[in-house]
């Protein structure tokens, strides 16, 4: 039996665009219509209407925190024109969480942008960072008295990878140099937002908030043990896992380290070009590990291995996302169990962990992959929008209640 600390946070996450529905003013919405993606987000899970019921379910599952995101394009549908009714909506979201004793963990940017911001060049232009800061100031002003945990940007490198390297998400550019510019702008935006949020709290005499990003980490391993693959693993581990965090830590712009962990990348390079070293993965099916329905390797040990290396930042860690898409709920139960064990082993090695948040509370819109991947501990019927609590959710609920895992 393993035991987690008494004050541990337990919960699940969502992101606005993936669950709310009808985010008409987001670049993604416009892009879905223009390019005819596999599946459009449409009404998503209608969480914009059903958030209270969804929070009731989270509460019934013994969660004590909930991570969600604000849809920037809702609250500022046009440049400099904030929609107060949408801000009121998110105030009510926070209040509803508080009423249920669910600690709100608020993400300010989770992949989507207002259309006007994208048209102005989005994250490709450093001048646009000020737009983000204005939005952050507005939201923090409106919600600050009830929010302790802020996540400025979700998975910055996942965003640049899909939007500016692979080119499968808007704005569909494929340029390594541009992806570097965007990554630098995201780092700069976080550092400035971090200072701004602290300043707002100070000015209002509120207790200092805890601010971070949600950093996606991957365990990388060479497929064939060649020098080239080993160099590629080194570069990816440095560049993908740690460079961004190092930059924020250098600016003392992190109060904790938010981590999203899902998988291992099996590296198999096809050449010596930078592109090969940074991007090639094994396409020959050499991995023996079990997979989720998107084909991602399931590798719980990776969480332990990365966490013990995170110790050097000397900051508490918060697992902000960890999850599996599967049609087999037993696999989800095992996934959660194994990752919690791995997490606990890292804690035994002295890593201070604040909490564990499963991705996701409910099935949702998995971006360009549509609605097929089922990540939720609660299932969603997309015809009736009915929610069904899965068995894995019930087992997780026991751990949330007791802090123990048999
Ligand atoms: O659905 C995504 C989420 O938006 C960000 N983190 C990974 C999840 C699963 O792919």
Image (spheres, rainbow, N blue to C red):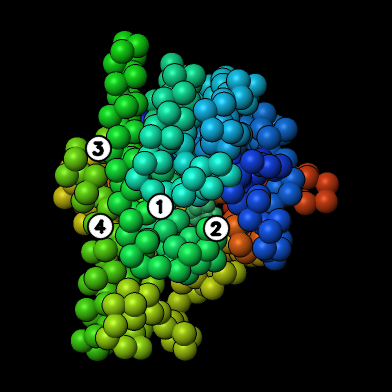
Label 4 vs label 1, nearer the camera: 1
User: Between disc 4 and disc 3, whose residue precedes?
Assistant: 4
Residue at the spot of label 3? 253
Secondary structure category for the residue under label 3: loop
User: Between disc 2 and disc 1, whose residue precedes?
Assistant: 1
User: Between disc 2 and disc 3, whose residue precedes?
Assistant: 2
Residue at the spot of label 1? 124
User: Between disc 4 and disc 2, whose residue precedes?
Assistant: 2
Q: Are marks 2 and 1 in contact (CB under 8 Å)?
A: no
On the picture, is 107 further left or further right than 220? Answer: right
Secondary structure category for the residue under label 4: helix
Residue at 32%, 60% in the rendered image: 180
Label 4 vs label 2, nearer the camera: 2
Q: Nearer the viewer, residue 71 or 390?
A: 71
Residue at the spot of label 2? 170
Residue at 46%, 48% in the rendered image: 122
Residue at the spot of label 4? 242
In the rendering, which numbered label is found on residue 391? none
Q: Would the CB of label 1 be found within 8 Å of ligand 1? A: no
User: Between disc 3 and disc 1, whose residue precedes?
Assistant: 1
Does 226 sit above or below residue 87? Answer: below
Spatial separation of the CA atoms under disc 2 and disc 1:
12 Å
Spatial separation of the CA atoms under disc 4 and disc 2:
25 Å
């Amino acid at each position: 039996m393993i035991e987690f600390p008494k004050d541990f946070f337990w919960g699940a996450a969502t992101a606005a665009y993936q669950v709310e529905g009808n985010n008409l003013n987001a670049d993604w919405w416009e892009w879905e219509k223009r390019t005819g993606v596999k599946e459009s987000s449409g009404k998503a899970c209608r969480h914009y209407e059903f958030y209270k019921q969804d929070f009731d379910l989270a509460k019934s599952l013994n969660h004590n925190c909930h991570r969600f995101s604000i849809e920037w394009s809702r609250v500022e549908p046009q440049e400099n024109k904030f929609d107060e009714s949408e801000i009121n909506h998110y105030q009510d979201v926070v209040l509803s969480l508080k009423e249920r004793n669910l600690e709100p963990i608020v993400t300010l940017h989770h992949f989507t942008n207002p259309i006007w911001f994208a048209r102005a060049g989005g994250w490709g232009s450093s001048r646009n960072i000020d737009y983000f800061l204005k939005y952050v100031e507005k939201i923090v002003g409106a919600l600050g008295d009830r929010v302790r945990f802020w996540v400025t940007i979700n998975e910055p490198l996942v965003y640049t990878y899909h939007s500016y390297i692979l080119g499968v998400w808007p704005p569909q550019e494929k340029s390594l140099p541009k992806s570097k510019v965007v990554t630098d702008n995201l780092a700069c935006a976080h550092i400035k937002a971090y200072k701004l949020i602290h300043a707002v709290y100070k000015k209002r005499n509120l207790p200092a908030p805890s601010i971070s990003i949600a950093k996606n980490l991957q365990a990388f391993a060479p497929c064939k043990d060649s020098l080239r693959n080993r160099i590629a693993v080194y570069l990816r581990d440095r560049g993908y896992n740690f460079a961004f965090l190092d930059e924020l830590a250098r600016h003392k712009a992190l109060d904790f380290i938010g981590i999203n962990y899902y998988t291992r990348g099996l590296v198999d390079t096809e050449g010596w070009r930078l592109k090969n070293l940074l991007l090639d993965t094994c396409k020959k099916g050499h991995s023996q590990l079990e997979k989720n329905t998107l084909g991602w390797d399931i590798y719980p040990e990776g969480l332990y291995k990365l966490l013990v290396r995170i110790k050097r930042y000397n900051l508490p860690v918060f697992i902000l996302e960890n999850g599996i898409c599967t049609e087999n709920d037993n696999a989800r139960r095992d996934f959660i169990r194994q990752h919690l064990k791995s997490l606990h082993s890292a804690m035994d090695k002295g890593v201070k962990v604040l909490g564990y948040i499963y991705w996701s509370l409910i099935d949702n819109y998995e971006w360009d992959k549509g609605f097929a991947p089922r990540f939720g501990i609660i299932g969603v019927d997309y015809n009736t929008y009915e929610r069904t609590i899965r068995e894995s959710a019930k087992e997780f609920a026991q751990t949330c209640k007791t802090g123990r895992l048999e």
